Amino acid sequence: MLLQMNSCSGFSLKYHPLQPSSSVKTFRLPSTQINGLVNRSQRKKYSVKCSSQSSFSLTNKVGNREDIINRNHKPLNKSTVALALQDGYASKSEEENTLPASFVQVLNKKFDALYRLTRPYTWASIIVGVLSVSLLAVQSPTDLTATYFIEVLKSMVPAIMMNNFVNAINQLSDVAIDKINKPHLPLASGDFSIAEGIAIAIASPMMGVAMGMMLRSPPLVICFIIWWIVGAAYSLDLPLLRWKGSPLMAAVTIIILNGLLLQFPYFVHFQKYVLGRPVVFPKQLLFAAAIMPIFNAAIAFSKDLPDVEGDKEFGLRTLPIILGRERVFSIAVNMLLTAYGAGVVAGATSPFLPCKLVAIIGHSALAALLWRKAQTVDLTDPPSMQSFYMFIFKLYYAEFFLMHFVR
């Protein structure tokens, strides 16, 4: 078949837009079968003239209906059909692979937001505190049975749920402030909706109290109810509440939540309801009850050091705003050094030489580390102040170990 083109704009046999004028292409149609019709007019030649108006006409006469059918249908071959089928299946496969991938991404994003809402690194104080206090009730190695350790794990879970409540209600109450101070938090950044935050804040304490009831431990049930009330009073902006706005009440809240509630209720639980012994408070527990509030107060004062700008904008009267960062930082460091001095004195009164040495050397070494860390803190740099705050938590965890040597 002969095809002749004369200055035809937009028409090319080789699908090229810049086909030279007066080009002549000759090709022969293969014998193909389309819809049951066989092209038997292979030897017929057609001359197509294309004008400048992009129109063309057939100069020969078409005398066969089969030629019309063959002319109006583009010949298909196996490679074309296979390619089309392959493309179709590829598109379907891509859609099937995209849906699970997007679901996994959303799920990962939600887990990351939950991590930032509940802040699992704060669970460390609960895990260390409960484990340390539980060991105070142990009087002999025979007490360390599998049942005992299972009870320890079971008592940790509701405390973690109560801690999640405190973190959630605090972030719910501080969304506007956190957009300035901590925009990475999930409620401030929008990774969690307010409704999702409220659901977690409601479900967590209810689960904690319910677990305390399942353990059949009145001291733990009372502990979790107090935890619920004090945690809400610390954050909720209601009359006589919002204790975090008062330096004194903020310190009292942290002393209660991080100190007293992890000591006496849990000791009574293990001593009476797990081991079945009458309650007698040992020297180590009384020492911890005296020294841990100092650590908690230092934590409360240091916590607000990086947040001065946002707290000041929203009218909060935290201690760093009232006294200044430098003075509050100095107070926190001196409080901790005083606590370590008390630990050295208490360790020196122990009648057991190994315990005496560990208590004296341990508290002295931690005091030296604290002094060295304090010299490197930049009070104009929020990350530096946050690093010091986290360092105090590490000192707090270490004290749960050292208190066992004050005998």
Image (cartoon, rainbow, N blue to C red):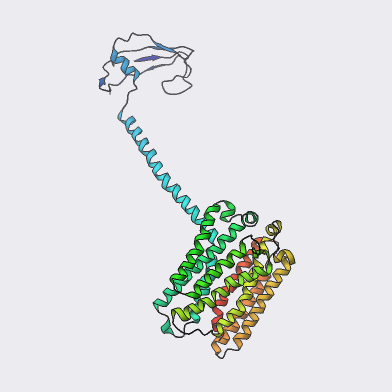
* Residue ID at (56%, 55%): 186
Residue 43 picture quarter: top left
Asked whether residue 43 appears in the rendered view, the answer is: no
Q: Position of 251 compared to 84: left or right?
A: right
Image: 5 above or below 251: above
Q: Position of 88 compared to 250: left or right?
A: left
Residue 397 picture quarter: bottom right
Task: Kindly give the residue lying farthest to the front in the view shown.
Answer: 239
Q: Position of residue 252 (x, y in %)?
A: 64, 71
Asked whether residue 278 appears in the rendered view, the answer is: yes
Q: Position of residue 205 (x, y in %)?
A: 51, 64
Q: Position of 70 compared to 243: left or right?
A: left
> Looking at the image, which is closer to me, 183 or 87?
183
Q: Position of residue 245 (x, y in %)?
A: 67, 63
> Looking at the image, which is closer to me, 163 or 359?
163
* Quadrant for the C terminus in the image: bottom right
Q: Position of residue 107 (x, y in %)?
A: 46, 52
* Residue ID at (56%, 64%): 166
Image: 110 above or below 345: above
* Quadrant for the N terminus in the image: top left
Image: 111 above or below 264: above
> Looking at the image, which is closer to me, 121 or 371?
121
Residue 365 picture quarter: bottom right
Label tally: 0
* Residue ID at (64%, 79%): 339
